[in-house]
Image: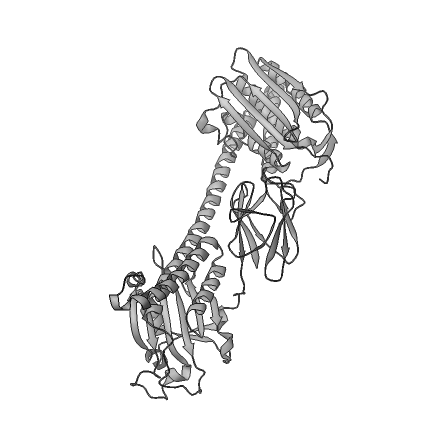
Amino acid sequence: MASLFVIQGYDQGRRLELEDTPITIGRDRNNGFHLEDTEISRQHVELRPAEDGYILTDLNSSNGTFVNNQEVKQCELTNGDRIQLGRTLMIFTHADQHVDTVSGQIDIIGDSPAAEESRIIKSISHEEGSQIFMLPKKDQDSQWLDSARDNLQLMYHTALAVSRTLDIDQLLDYIMGLIFDWIDADRGCIMLYDLESGELEAHAHRERKDRGKDKEPLHISKTILDYVLNQKEGVLTSDAGEDQRWDAGGSIINIGVREAICVPMQGRYGIVGIIYVDTYTPPGSITDINQKNSFNEDHLKLMVAIAHQAALAVEDTHYYSALVQSERLAAVGQAVAAISHHVKNILQGISGGSYLVKEGLKSEKNDVIRKGWEIVEKNQAKISDLVMDMLSFSKEREPEQTLANPCDVVQEVVELMQNRAEKFGVNCECITDENMPEFYFDIDGIHKALLNVVTNAIDASAEEENGQVTVTCHLEKQRNSIQITVEDNGHGIPEEQLEKIFTAFESTKGSQGTGLGLPISRKVLREHGGDIQVTSQINQGSRFLLEFPVVLTPDN
């Protein structure tokens, strides 16, 4: 299964599993993969399945498409390619083989004579494995250089796979392929500890298909496995066919394993699994007792180094998953705390109003009842606003495009806010382009987004002696976009808070605000393929720019 994973940008963390059908990517919601990135085109690229993978084609995008930092018009994607669209960076992963049936192909043999008879030729620690590139004696220079060149190439490809691949099963399957290209093994597997059960589970398995052997489970000696895990050392073993202490009828020959390498996957914090490869002769087959060994000590050392690289990748993936889960739980906790705070304040208002209504009923004083009921109604409206804001913020919404004049929406918002502005002694004026044509956009969405920003601007200017809010709307022809600016002469926003004002439940109004107004406004603008920018200076005021692209037809 091929997939795209967003590792940088507004949609960071999103993942798309690719099917066997073409798919387009862009900021328009009609794409198969919609991205909230204002620097990409409405339809930016197309991915089309090919015989061995996927073909990426740039759809005449404005800012171009980059694969591995090179601008491309069309290219065939390979596993690990990094795709840059605007501010969005994605990684493409594609497994050549499926490994979902691995578990049934691996069998760990218990403490039996067959397991005991395998002889350990050599064992090395993780530290010794790192010495694979140490300089040799002078009379071995030529042979060492040839070997080191091959070893460096293998380690390079391993490190490259670790840096590019986020899917662990795909990475481990790729590493098994590298190992089989390098040594003459018949079978192999990679097993990882399950985080919940603590048991080893197979994640990658490979057999050399050109040997014509019968399909049988891969048996791994538990004795060898326990030694590797307990001693934290990789081992190279031979069977009774080579060891003169055992005759040809020994049970290890019946199992069929002639020699094997088993190494621990040692990470920063411990062992996360093992890598195992062996050579195999089907039970009953005739084996040449003088047959040359396929594995040597250099193979063992390099396997230890490869296992370490793979272990680091596994640990990083586990850490990333835990970090994402932790951030989700923290976000949930923050949301619950913020909502509880707002609801508590509203309930206190309702409780106070209800008390006045109750006292008015006892004394039959209609003025007290009326006053109490006004308080209850006001707080009921707050609850309704809070619920609607939460729904607007959390729900994915497709803009309902309607042909209209943006300036009309701006004027309507300013007129609606005149009473609030007069209440706080703020002059709120509107400057619009009289020749503004009509475009397609979501009238209700832009109205809501602008209303939130204008309300904040009036509140920010309320304490000024001559509070002023100016709202302008014009067509920016060079950028082919509609720009709405809201400027005030209020107290301004401290620089350290500028990045937080668009964070959910971050409010500077205390109990008077929900902290969802500006996040909703940004969400609406990004749904239109636009965004909100803000500049501010303390004691001089703030300027909010709401910008979204021109749409001439509803399906554009």
Query: Which residue is outermost to the top?
Result: 465
User: Is residue 375 shown to the viewer in this render?
Assistant: no
Residue sitting at 35 percent across and 63 percent down?
A: 148
x and y percentages locating residue 370 in the rendered image: 63, 20
Colouring rule applied to residues: one colour
In which quadrant of the rendered view does residue 450 lie? top right
* Image-based side of 139 in relation to 284, left or right: left
| Nearer the observer, 17 or 339 | 17
* Image-based side of 416 in relation to 150, left or right: right
In the picture, the quarter occupied by the N terminus is: bottom right
In the picture, the quarter occupied by the C terminus is: top right
In which quadrant of the rendered view does residue 55 lie? bottom right
x and y percentages locating residue 543 in the rendered image: 55, 23
| Nearer the observer, 101 or 342 | 101
| Nearer the observer, 460 or 338 | 460
Above or below, comparing residue 98 to residue 111 in the picture: above
Residue sitting at 37 percent across and 84 percent down?
A: 251
* Image-based side of 10 in relation to 161, left or right: right
Q: How many marks?
A: 0
In which quadrant of the rendered view does residue 297 lie? bottom left
Above or below, comparing residue 245 to residue 457 in the picture: below
* Image-based side of 150 in relation to 456, left or right: left
x and y percentages locating residue 546 in the rendered image: 60, 28
x and y percentages locating residue 49 in the rendered image: 63, 57
User: Is residue 478 shown to the viewer in this render?
Assistant: yes
